[in-house]
Amino acid sequence: MLSNSVSYAQLLETNNMLQALTDETYWLCVTRTTQESKLFPVPSYMLLSYLNAYYRYPTLLRKIEARMPAEQLGDRARQMGTKIDTLTMGWTLPGFYNLGREWLINMGLLRPEDAVEDTVYVMDFWKRFQLSYHRNDGHITNRDFGHRSQILPEHQLQVFQADLFAVEAGDRLHTAANKFMATVSQFQFLSHCECRIGICNQGPYKFGEKSELIVRDFMDLAECDYPWLDGVSAEVPYNNLTIPMVAKDTHFYLMDDWGSFESEPEFKAESISHIGLYTSDHLTEGRLPVAMGSAGELAAEFDRLREIFTEATGKLWKRIAAWSRAEMIEAGALVYYNIPKDLAHLAGVYEQSDWFDIDERAARFIPLLNDEFGRDCLTELVGLVSLPSQQVNDYTMMQHSNLPKRMYTPIPYAILETGTYTRTSGPLYPGSHVLADKKGKWRTSRGDLTQAEYNQAARGFTPKLCQAPYIHFDETWVKYHHDDPEVDEMYRIAQAQSRNLKDRGAGLSRADVEKLRGDG
Amino acid sequence: MTGKSAAKIALATNKYGDAEATPLTKMFHERIRALVQRKLEESGGDWNSFVFDKSYDLITEADMVAIEKEVLATGYRYDVSATISAKEAPEKYKPLAGQDEVEFSGEVVDGKVQVGFGDNVVKYPQNLVGTACYVHTSEDVMELMMNGVPEGSIAVIDDSGGTLTAPVLEGFAGVICMGGTVRSHLGILTREYGIPCLMNCKIQGIKNGDRLEMNVSAGAKTAQDYQKNIEKTAEIWKLV
């Protein structure tokens, strides 16, 4: 018998989040195509990642939060284009953990009332992060906002508006930018073992009559956490790149929690009217402009980067094509499992073994992960919702399908009566890997750093805009206090590296910024 | 209420539960559940001390190997999706299935005969004419990397992913993919590169070196078309 360490209110809230996750996971999985690959056994590695997430996330999130609370991580993440974004945090963190839980229930290895404190904690961490990350739009997820994300504050959007270069289909910058985006997208699918988590979009933001901005981030490009990029990405100068782009006559009516969008009419490269390039990491004062001095300079930089990524793609493909199936399964599982790893970088507690080992509790199941079982078990888990644990009473009509099913099993309230539940799946167990060890340094805005140097630098750094008093100067405060010297200073900090907006302060409207653009 | 759990595993009593829908998932899961039940009983039957402590030592990788061996001993063989799976363990996998049979009329109209159709990713002003070039394996890609993609080649690919063809995709004039949808990674990448592409294709009788015309001036298939099951296909012709 355990004394109850969770309250009725906590269970109500946790189960509400699990149900919302059920509804959205089903929608995402049936409207987004299942990816297949002749190179990678994708569904098999996805299943393995879920088990690793289930066994390891609670311990690792607690380790991160011992240095930095979830809501502070959310505040920091808004300022950057790193892998702490909609895609990694909006759905995947709770999704992976709970898919692991659900699969284990179906193998008879868990009951719904097991590791209750872990499940409550993971969902509470996620909620606090999401509320903070989405502070400016006031929602908890893109889904909650009708599939939209407006993460950025006015001062960042004004810098984009002032500095993005006007382009037209066929001009040098338009051509260079689009060729670069194709090349780097290709590289990201490859370096991320066929999954999309190296690319994420947010927005839209209104940029004028019939003009909307979306912000696209490409993350983990250089020599970084992924051991397979050691050497391959030696020439890649930036680990993360952000490309804000304005589309004319295109309405982005859907931006989901996987960071992908739908638009009306269909988005085409020819629709892009303004574009720019920025970089950021856990050690930068927000997003820093890259080659934003002139349109010609930016076009040349896109061309230079494109050549670098074309070369890197060839090298990486040859490395991966020589991998064994065990290496492919492991690499894919790790890319999925370690989606929250940048939280550890941000908190300065990153350890490669935390995020690049398969826990021995998860590794037990690798012999089952042939192609067919991977495909079918995953399809049952997230598409058919047909596993035994997922069936509920016949009166139930699940959102979207109207079927008596539920993807994620709630925690039973009866534990408040019986007290018979378990609290946690335990501490981190030993892990191992068959892939090559990480040997290179981490490429950052402060040069190439060792793991220890990177952690130390992260622990000693807080961007100015995340310090008092600015961190709590929100949009409502700005609305009524834009003439306050401290608010004005906050805008000047954000404008420090702007080509057209430096030292303009807090008083400008969107129309004012448009007039300042000059020839763009 | 008792504070001690009964010696039953999860799902042992399940008012609403059905069995798994797919045969292999059912076979594996049933065997694992039976294993867990047996190990629980052997360990004394207390679930709370079993679930996260004893079970880690009692349910092992060797058990999973044994379960797979038992299933394979029934004569069951797995469907394959990744090339490497069958390459490393051919004894566990069925031979690769061929393309679904489709038949076209064979009627020659204006010097061309239909040999396929698919979902158009992007509408272009004109159709594309090029030469068929099959890309099935890593070895095919390696050869194209070494020798270059011949100008005007139309890749004929059965993989809708974005990784197999990564180093050579940009060199193709067009892509015919037998899987996926316009939103698969390959569809996304061809759109970004500006390469005409048909996804989810059914084809018949296309050989390496055939001169093909892709009807990429047809309307693009949209997400709404898929959701509403609207048929919207674009033809592939062989020039004769």
Image (cartoon, coloured by chain):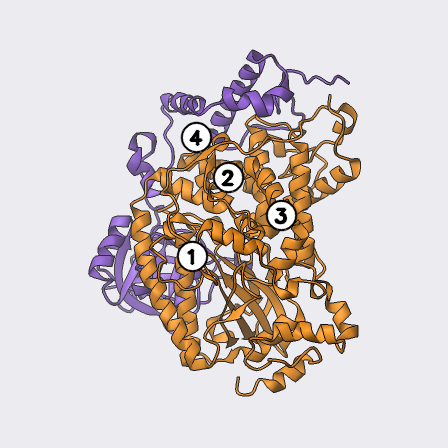
**Mark 4 closeness class: few <14, some 14–19, many ≥20 residues within 10 Å:** many
The residue labelled by disc 1 is: A188
- Label 4: element kind: helix
Q: Which image quarter: residue A466?
A: bottom right
Tell me where residue B18 appears, x and y as whole percent. Answer: 60, 28
Colour given to chain B in the rendered image = purple
| A142 sits left or right of A215 in the view | right
Q: Chain of mark 3?
A: A
Residue at image coords 75%, 25% = A419
Tell me the CA gap for discs 4 and 2: 13 Å
Q: Amino acid at mark 1?
A: Gln
Mark closest to the chain's N terminus, 4 or 3: 3
Dot 2 and dot 3 within a common chain: yes
- Label 2: element kind: helix
Which label belongs to residue A368?
A: 4
Q: Amino acid at mark 3?
A: Arg
| B148 sits left or right of B94 in the view | left
Q: Is residue A170 visible?
A: no
Q: Chain of mark 4?
A: A
Tell me the CA gap for discs 2 and 1: 23 Å
Viewer-side label of 4, 2: 4
The residue labelled by disc 3 is: A67
Colour given to chain A in the rendered image = orange
Mark closest to the chain's N terminus, 4 or 1: 1
Tell me where residue A137 appears, x and y as whole percent. Answer: 69, 62
The residue labelled by disc 2 is: A378
Tell me the CA gap for discs 3 and 1: 30 Å
Q: In this orientation, which residue lies closer to the viewer: A322 or A467?
A: A467
Tell me the CA gap for discs 2 and 3: 35 Å
Count of numbered circles in the view? 4
Q: Are marks 4 and 2 in contact (CB under 8 Å)?
A: no
